[in-house]
Amino acid sequence: MKKIIIIIIVLVLVLGTIFYIFKQKNIKNKKMVEIKVYYGDIVSVIRLNGSVEPRNRLPIKPQIAGRIDDILVVEGQKVKKGEIIAWLSSSERAALLDIAKSQGEQEYKKWQEIYKPTPIIAPLDGFIIVRNKEPGQTVTTNDNIVVMADELIIKAFVDETDLRYVKLGQKVRVSLDAYPDIKFSGIVEHIAYESNEISNVKVYEVKIKPVFSPTGSFFSSPMKDRIQRKPYEFIPRSERKEFSKSFVYQKRTEDISSILRSGMSSTVEIIAEERRNVLVLPTTAIIDTGKEKYVLVKKQNKVIKQQVETGLSDGKNIEIINGLSEGDVVVVTQGKIYSGPFSSSSSIRGYQNPMSSFFRRQ
């Protein structure tokens, strides 16, 4: 029995030793990447889910029951206030004309002139978003012949925790699920004073007026990928002017209603916070123990621990307030996400747990 126990103990020790040696070998040969601290911009963007809706949605109902003689508009057509959009025969006129028609064409035309149809008039300037009826159909005073809208806006809901980032007159960017490559600007024109509750979360309705017609993506391909893939993303200095342009009001050059449709799903992007021309590192370079934050800095072929004070993070990159200077070299395990400039990639011999041997060299 004792021999079996001894054999088991020896096997455990041998396997443990092999595992330790293998692990240390992997650690020592682990590829590291050197990152230079540099100045850049961090932009934190919040995204709101929204939809395209009419500012004023007005169903047009007949004042009398009868039969539709003609509808003069189609969906998407613009109309002016007071413009005739349809002709309607009352139930009495429709019955009278049916009798007259059976008596001959001359009798029919006579009663057409005597008994005029009733016009349906547009009550406001706008356009037709729905056409429900066709000539020859009968209607009651409860039926919608067409539905009008004065203009289409974007309605979105913002969580109460993000409400502080939304301001009246603020410029935002809007994209449509139906046209993901087309983006246009908008201006916040109303923030609700009363909350709604969606999935036990307090939210406030925000109304956004489109102010810039789509002309395709405003960004180069790298920027478009950044905006579409991540809700929070680092914006390199070389691209920040291009990014800012999308949030600057530009004069409308064409009618945006050519692609907007009521009910379309949309995404509204709002700049929550931004830091311009600050020291930046990827968040993966920061080691956070809960009590302190530090990075591994390479100085004279040694890797040392350097405490840092951090600021705004966009989820991928972070602002460095204190502890580092431009050009300082920070080492990070290769393979972690990083979008900034790289220096040479090298294998740092002797690298172990950052809490052990490297810090004893200081």
Image (tube, grey):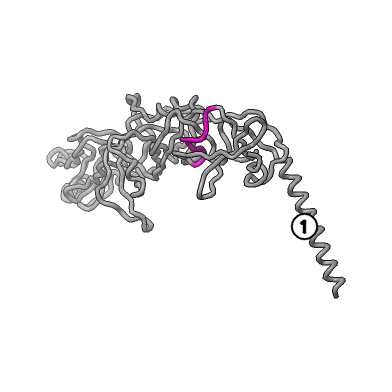
State whether residue 263 is above or below residue 276.
below
Amino acid type at image mark 1:
Gly
Q: Which residue is mark 1?
A: 16
Residue lying furthest right: 3
Name the residue at 28% across, 48% down: 137
**Left or right side of 141 for 250:** right
State whether residue 216 is above or below residue 60.
above
Residue 321 within the magenta-colored segment of the rendering: yes
Q: Nearer the viewer, residue 237 or 277?
A: 277
Q: Position of residue 347 (x, y in %)?
A: 71, 35
Q: Position of residue 42 (x, y in %)?
A: 46, 34
**Left or right side of 39 for 70:** left
**Left or right side of 79 for 50:** right
Name the residue at 78% across, 50% down: 21
Q: Position of residue 192 (x, y in %)?
A: 26, 46
SS under mark 1: helix
Within 10 Å of the Cα at label 1, are there few (<14), some (14-19), or many (20+) other Cα atoms? few
Quarter the C terminus occupies: top right
Residue 54 within the magenta-colored segment of the rendering: no
**Left or right side of 304 for 192:** left
Judge whether residue 273 can be spotted in this image. yes
Q: Nearer the viewer, residue 33 or 269?
A: 33
Q: Position of residue 265 (x, y in %)?
A: 40, 44
Count of all numbered marks drawn on residues in the image: 1
Quadrant in the picture for residue 264: top left
Judge whether residue 228 can be spotted in this image. no
Residue range in magenta is 315-326
Name the residue at 33% across, 38% down: 75
Q: Nearer the viewer, residue 250 or 153?
A: 250
